[in-house]
Every structure is written in C-alpha cells, then in structure tokens.
Image (spheres, rainbow, N blue to C red):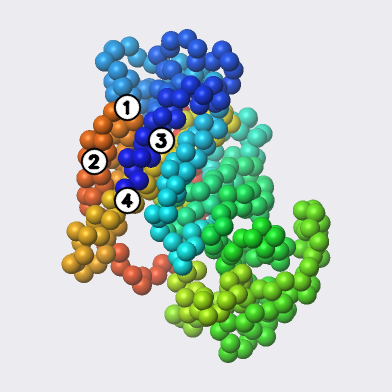
Amino acid sequence: MEKGNNTFKSIKNKINSIEFMRKNRNSEKDFTRNRKLPFSSLILFMLNLVKQTLQKELTNFISLISSSKENITKSAFSQSRKKLRAEAFIELNETLIESFYEDDDFKKWKGFRLLAIDGTCLTLPQSNEIIKDFGFAKNNVNPESIIPMAKVSSFYDLLNGIIIDSQIDQYKISEFMLAINHLDKVGKNDLIILDRGYAATWFFIYMNLKNVDYIVRLQRNFLQEFDSFWNSKKMSEIITLERCSEKSIKALEILGIKFESFKIRLVKVILENGEIEVLATSLLDEEKYHYAEFKDLYFSRWGIETNYDHLKNNVAIENFTGLSTLSVTQDFFANMFIVNLQSVIINDVQTEIDEEKKETKYEYKINRNLSLGFMKDRVIKILLSNNSKGYEELKKLFKLEPVPIRNGRKFERKFKLTKRKYSITKKKAI
C-alpha cells in the first residue's frame, strides 16, 4: 500500500494546525500579525532544501507560493526564524514516522524492525555562540585555530530507510549517552545492530532491562570469558556472564542498576579473507536464529553509514543557513525530516521499479541524489495543493535513472581530514 499520499496529508494538516503553531512559537505574540512570512510559510521555506544564497532562495520561494511581487529580505527571514522553535521539525518528523508505521505494511526481518544506532560529527559555522553551546575540535593542520563541531546520532530503520530518532549535541558528549536516549523509541519487535564501539557489558545489561534485542560486534579482547569461543571451532555458543569490569560497574551505578549475571549468545562470522568476527546477541534461540544468517544480518548495518554519506554529501547537512545555535538545530531537524520524506516516496516507487525491472540482469534502486534534487520546490507545491497529481508526477521523476545493485562488491572504509566545505557568507547562487 502506498504511504506517500497519506503522509503528505498528515504533514499538511500538521503545518496548518493552529495548535501546532501555538506549540512551536517562542511567544504568544509571535505569528499573530499578517506578515510576508507567516508560520506555515516559514516552515515550508525551511523544508525546501535551502542550500543556495538566502536571498535567491527567498525570492524563488515567494514566486513559488504567491503571485505577489513583493520580496522577503534575509533580515526579515532571520527575525521570523527566531520566533520558531526547532522542535517544530521534530514534531513533523514524529508525524511522518507515525503515519509510515501506522499499519503493519513495512519491511521486516523475521518479524523484527531492523534498526541501527551510530554517531558522527558535524562541522558547524564559526560563531562564539555555537562554539559555546556545541564545543570545538583542534585543527590538526593549524594548531592555533579551532573548528566548531557537534556530535550527532541516528536511530535508523535499515530496511525502510527511516530515521526513527536523531539527536544533535555537544561535540564531547559520549555516543553511549545519545544511544541511551534513542532507546526510548524502541518498540516491542525491534532488533538493534551495533558496531563494536557500542560493545560494553553495562550497555548489554541496560538493553536487557529495557527488553531490547540486539546484535553487537565485539573487539578481539573484549572479555577473557570469550577467548575460548574465539579459539574454538564453534559457530555459536550461549555464555553466562558472572562478572563485569570495574568500568561497567561504575556505569551501572550511575544508572542506578545493580549487576546481575545474564546469558548472552556469541556468534562467529567468517569473512571472505578468512578473518573471524564475533557478534554478541540477545537472540538466544539457536534454531530460530541460525548462526549462518548473522553475517548478512550484521552487514546490513552498512545502511546507516550510507545514510550519513547521503546526509553529508547529497543533502549537504553541514551547509547551515545561520550563525546561531537555533539556526543549526532548525536546519538539522529540517534536513532529517526531508530525508525521511524522501524515503517514504522511495518506498512507494521502489515497488514499481522492482516490477518494471524484474527481467533485467540486476535489481535496481532509486537514485537518492537525483531524486533529492527533484524534491526541491515540488514538495512545497504538493503540500500547498488539494490533489494528488503533484505527488504522482514526483514519483515518475523518482523513477528516472535508477541505480543497479551489484551484490558482493566490497569497499574499504577510508578516513581523511578535510577543511570546512561550506561558507556561511559565500554561498553559491546556482
């Protein structure tokens, strides 16, 4: 069943809701007069992938929504956005997510919604306010300069491409703390896949207490009790942990939790080069969840990495539109929403692509970069329209130049230090 039309209707109703406006303005006096950029128009403008010069974007937007030849200045926009809480975009995202999952018609693995948690860092604009609120990193090239940075974390549906929850916080905050916050969004039939950076005995205990199912990659020297399994020929084994490290005990004490022994399953994965990886999981039923399934299951976690790549390189999430903490958080959550909306449309269109390409050599997927570009202006027109014609036209554009899926290709992960990509004062005009 198509979800896009229902999602657009839910979002449109939310944006035009008086209650939504009252809840997400900073003062009762805000958005009470007739202005060139009223509440709903301000929301729509900030959802329109604003990446070029602000004045050009504002001029284009006014021509898009009105026949008036009056313009909106950057100053007027800056004053209007100060009245808007960043939580408005979080609420819009929650409305989208609720609409997407309101029925049982979405992709699962053995009844589980397959999720991943991972964090990354974002480079922020240079301002004293932003440095104070988010922190900074030292510039390795020039030790005398600093780079404003933020830590972000995503809770991501790997099979459906939906960001369940996203957070932006101080650069120095622990990714574990952000992960704990994500767990408030966990449902009954969710399975979380985590990289080895999240392997900690106290975190396993915390997830057990939350009734969260998980798969976590382990480091080779994680616990002495696991050594015999690494060196054995066993592919799966259930172990009872009777103790934990002092570090984990302290972490549990902070959370008000007392350590108790628990069972955990170890699963061995053999890579193509012969190397061994070991996964820890709460899925203890060795017949229902056979060890041979865990290799592909774990590597599906790569989807959250590719989503970060999409956010940074296609969405240009680090291309912020202001120098305040408010503008950073507004832009961040607006971008999370628009990427989720893109995924809703992709899920609708992918079914049609699968049918059209069923006789071809490869399976095909939607071109995320190209389809994102097609959303510019068109999403706004759909949200302002009273019919579904615009959505059907956008779906047709999403089907252009699909990308073949060539299974089995491996890519080495590369890290490099780069300078800031986007200037606040020098934005492209095209």
Q: Are marks 4 and 3 in contact (CB under 8 Å)?
A: no
Marks 4/2 in contact by CB < 8 Å: the verdict is no
Residue 95's place in the image compared with 370, above or below, is above
| Disc 1 residue type (three-letter) | Leu
What SS does tag 1 mark?
helix
The residue that appears at 39% across and 27% down in the rendered structure is 45
Residue 141 in the image: state x and y as whole percent: 57, 48
Q: Residue 1, labelled with which disc?
A: 4
The mark that comes first in sequence, 3 or 2, is 3
C-alpha distance separating marks 4 and 3? 16 Å
Q: Which residue is mark 1?
A: 384
Q: Nearer the viewer, residue 325 or 399?
A: 399
2 or 1: tag closer to the N-terminus: 1
Task: Specify the quadrant of the image occupied by residue 252.
Answer: bottom right
Name the residue type under label 2: Glu
Q: Which residue is mark 2?
A: 392
- The span from disc 4 to disc 2 (Cα, nearest Å) is 14 Å
- Give the mark, 1 or 4, whose residue is nearer the N terminus: 4
Label 4 sits on what residue type? Met
> Gap between marks 1 and 3, in whole Å?
13 Å
| Image x and y of residue 322, in percent | 50, 28
Residue 301's place in the image compared with 329, above or below, is: below
| The one of 284 and 397 positioned closer to us in this rendering | 284
Of circles 1 and 3, which is in front? Answer: 3
Percent x, y for residue 311?
44, 47
**Mark closer to the observer (1, 4):** 4
Q: Is residue 247 left or right of residue 195?
A: right
